[in-house]
Structures are given as C-alpha cells and as structure tokens.
Image: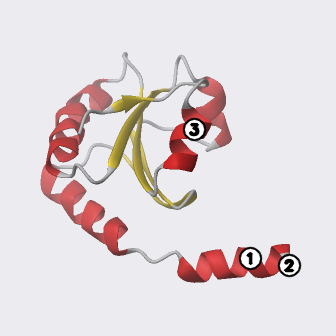
Amino acid sequence: MAITNLTQDNFKTVIESNPFIVIDFWAQWCEPCLMFSNTFKNAALKHPDVMFCMLDTETNAEIAAYFNIEQIPCVLAIKNQIVIDGIVGVMPSQSFEESLQQWRVFDTTEINRHFSEQDA
C-alpha cells in the first residue's frame, strides 16, 4: 500500500476512516528521519492492511504539537482512533516489524468500554 502524506486537510478523515494507522513524524532536515524512511516504506509494502502515513513536522507543526511530538523521527500507532504506542528514534527493520506485530494484536476493547461508560 502507498504511504499517505498527512496534512491539516486530510488528517481527521484519515484517522476516522482507518482502524489501524502508523504515522511517521519526520522533517526533511532530519538525518535520522531520512535513515528510517526506507524501513518505514518497506514495512508499508509488507503490510497492506495497515494505513502507513507520514507527517512532515515542519509543514504541519500544529498536528505535531497536538501529539506532543518533540523529537523525530517519532512513530505513533493508532488503533480505532486511540494512540496505543509511540517510539522515538531510528529503529532497525526487525525492531520495527516486532512493534508492528505487537500493535496489530493490541486489543482496544477495554479502552473503548471505559470511554463508552464515561459517555453514558
């Protein structure tokens, strides 16, 4: 699956319409970000059922600030509109694959139940 570039214009729609999203927060000037980009792109090809997105923190600073992104590269995993994990720094391919597998099986049922009860 192709990687989606997130912006202010499409962020809300992408988050609300995809059950499992992995976002790479990056910037063009960031050497570690550029090093990690191949790992991220290769993972996107291997996992077409996951929505892989990139967000340039320079051009979308408001979104990065909303998620308190202070260091890049930073990857956030979001399931059912819930941030379930975040990792800062360059990850080797194997470590990133292991994280993807853990995120894939993460169950948000109890979190969803908690917030349903809060809304009731």
- In x, y percent, where is residue 41? 20, 36
Lower sequence index among marks 3 and 1: 3
Can I make out residue 86 in this image? Answer: no
Residue type, label 3: Thr
Tally of marks: 3
Quarter holding the C terminus? bottom right
Residue type, label 1: Ser
Quarter holding the N terminus? top left
Question: Gap between marks 3 and 2, in whole Å?
Answer: 26 Å
Residue placed most toward the observer, 50 or 62: 50
- In x, y percent, where is residue 13? 57, 38
Residue shown at 14% from the left, 49% from the top: 46
**What number is the disc on residue 120?**
2
Question: Gap between marks 3 and 1, in whole Å?
Answer: 22 Å
Residue type, label 2: Ala
Quick check: marks 1 and 2 in contact, CB under 8 Å? yes
SS at badge 1: helix
- In x, y percent, where is residue 80? 53, 61
The residue tagged 3 is 13
Q: Residues within 10 Å of mark 1 (few under 14, many from 20)?
A: few
Residue shown at 61% from the left, 38% from the top: 12
Residue 94 lies left or right of residue 26; in this view the side is: left
**What number is the disc on residue 116?**
1
Quick check: marks 3 and 1 in contact, CB under 8 Å? no
Quick check: marks 3 and 2 in contact, CB under 8 Å? no
